[in-house]
Amino acid sequence: NPVLSKLGCNQGTCHGSAKGKNGFKLSLRGYDPIFDIRALTDDLASRRVNPASPDDSMMLLKSSGAVPHMGGQLTKDGDAAYEIIRNWIHNGAGVNLASPRVARIDVLPVNPVVPRIGDKQQIRVVATYVDGKTRDVTQESFIDSGDTEVATASRFGLMTAVRRGEASILVRYEGAYAATTITVMGDRTGFVWKQPETWGKVDQLVANKWQRMKIEPSELAGDTEFIRRVYIDLTGLPPSADDVRAFLADKRPNREKRDALVDKLIGSEGYIDYWTNKWADLLQVNRKFLGPEGALNFRSWIRDQVANNTPYDKFAHTILTASGSNRENPAASYYKILREPTATMENTTHLFLAVRFNCNKCHDHPFEKWTQDQYYETSAFFAQIGLKNDPKAGDAKIGGTAVEGAKPLYEVVFDNMAGDVTHERTGAVTPPKFPFPAKYVSNPKATRREEIASWMTSADNQFFAKSYVNRLWGYLFGIGIMEPIDDLRAGNPPTNPELIDYLTQEFINSKFNVQHVLKLIAKSRTYQLSFRTNKWNSDDKLNYSHSAARRLPAEVLYDTIYASLGAQTKIPGVKPGTRAAALPDSGVELPSGFLATFGRPVRESACECERSAGMQLGPVMALVSGPTLAEAIADPANALAKLVQTVSDDRQVVNELFLR
């Protein structure tokens, strides 16, 4: 077959057979090579290959399922797509690079609302080309539902409502992406909108969405519910019995005394330890990479940044530009952990932009606008970072296996001003180039990573500020405005665009003040709603109309047990009394494995998905009958023992335990 011989398939081994319309039989033996579509079309275009029949082209044989294909059958003889490709091959498979390309696509209608379950909504896709012309491309587009339990999509964009809720609609066409949200209203007979009390802009924007969705919010949480929630969310510890009593006795108006409590907690020692632990997760503070000493130093550095409320852009910029020995400059540990340009790029874009570039390493991103070229162009910014042994570390090493050698305990990070990234597909050296524009202060003498650090942390970067305020919202509500909270993409639109835009702008206007955004969220009436639902919000999981019950994270659960019982922690390798949220690194574990059992992340990636909050039988039994709770209760010096000795009335004992 001319196509196979021109493409070099005859140099390997193939298998299977297929017969074209003209009777030509294609025989393949061995294995089925999967050709990259771009490479195949480029080759056909350059060689002007004419198969015996267009139907014998591998492009059609594979896509129609005539020969084995891992992607399955995508078209069949007679389909419009089949005939377009067939005619193109028949006419010489030419490529006109001057043809206008798609500049953008628009999805219509924007944010459609379907009144009843079972109703249908046709989606229309209009492409705008660089020459300004437009064309309806609905039939050629890929249209998917982000939640098939709410709405399903047919091949040509006819949406069917399945149940009340919201589903994102992701549309792809010729490398352009767009998204909108379909709302299935369902039966709201009898609903009457009552404007809730608002305490600020956050509440107003959330209430606007409630009104559109015909949702009635829950009542304000009571004082006991609120004080527990805000202590756990901001400090990772429960309030003490005295804290509860004092708060309940405070006769000031609800909003006033609650604002004062938020101000008291944010910046407290408990807050500093808890939020340091969050960043230690994301920055992979792990003795496996840094050794116990290096991990302790890195965590201490992070704690100083949290305690000083270092502006978020400065915090990120300092990490990305850190140089010198990680013994003297712990922030340089970031590059000791990641080491390779592509790994550093994937981690950095995920961590600080919530953009997942790992999906476009081997091909263009299947569900986003990012290309394979951009993967290597962005990686090139980290190609000139060098690592060398810190002489002051002596011969001390970390790790080492039969496959990979041990690393020096401390290393010096430097810019060697040489080094490039080679594109995996083309084999060519790839110069650095930003994947999208953003205004930033450029310095002609800046190193490559100084350039990308300035670009990435710029207020004009469309993902930097937005990605972190979405994380903060998700930490306090249990669900982000975009969920997962570290995955910003076209197919993951915000549930409340106006809300995330407002919080993002507030973050930027405050000069990236993290505590300012946390106070905005925690002081909102929306954050302080009860978990108790009503008829009109019991099915709401996306619009914050009531608080959501959440399982305590591993460290919080452990610390809560010991704090409430007044027992002293005894974790191996650290001082007695050290709370789990203050442990120096993920290598410190309890003999029972309690923290790992309850989902503490292993800190080997920047993905929020490393932490789990599931509740399976194993963890339940570990809590109920394991040694962690038993040892805390059995501690002769705990508050429970003292309480029983000093209080004779059992009712008072029970009340005190409940408060604790």
Image (tube, helix red, strand yellow):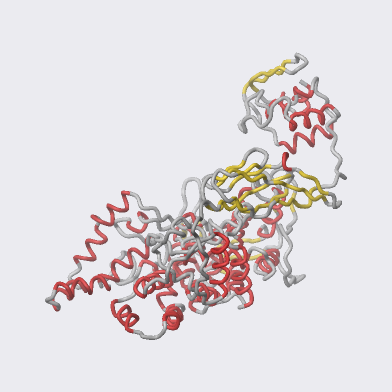
Residue 655 in picture, x, y percent from top left: 22, 73
Nearest to the observer: residue 318 or residue 473: 473
Q: Is residue 368 above or below residue 286?
A: above
In the rendered image, the residue lying farthest to the top is 23
Quarter of the rendering containing residue 245: bottom left
Quarter of the rendering containing residue 201: bottom right
Nearest to the observer: residue 87 or residue 305: 87
Residue 422 in picture, x, y percent from top left: 70, 49
Q: Give the side of residue 223 with respect to residue 526, left or right.
A: left
What residue is rendered at 38% in x and 59% in y? 551
Nearest to the observer: residue 313 or residue 451: 313
The C terminus, quarter of image: bottom left
What residue is rendered at 64% in x and 20% in y? 16
Residue 71 in picture, x, y percent from top left: 62, 33
Nearest to the observer: residue 521 or residue 610: 521
The answer to whether residue 567 is seen in the rendering is no
Quarter of the rendering containing residue 569: bottom left
Q: Give the side of residue 19 with respect to residue 485, left or right.
A: right
Q: Give the side of residue 443 with respect to residue 620, left or right.
A: right
What residue is rendered at 63% in x and 74% in y? 508
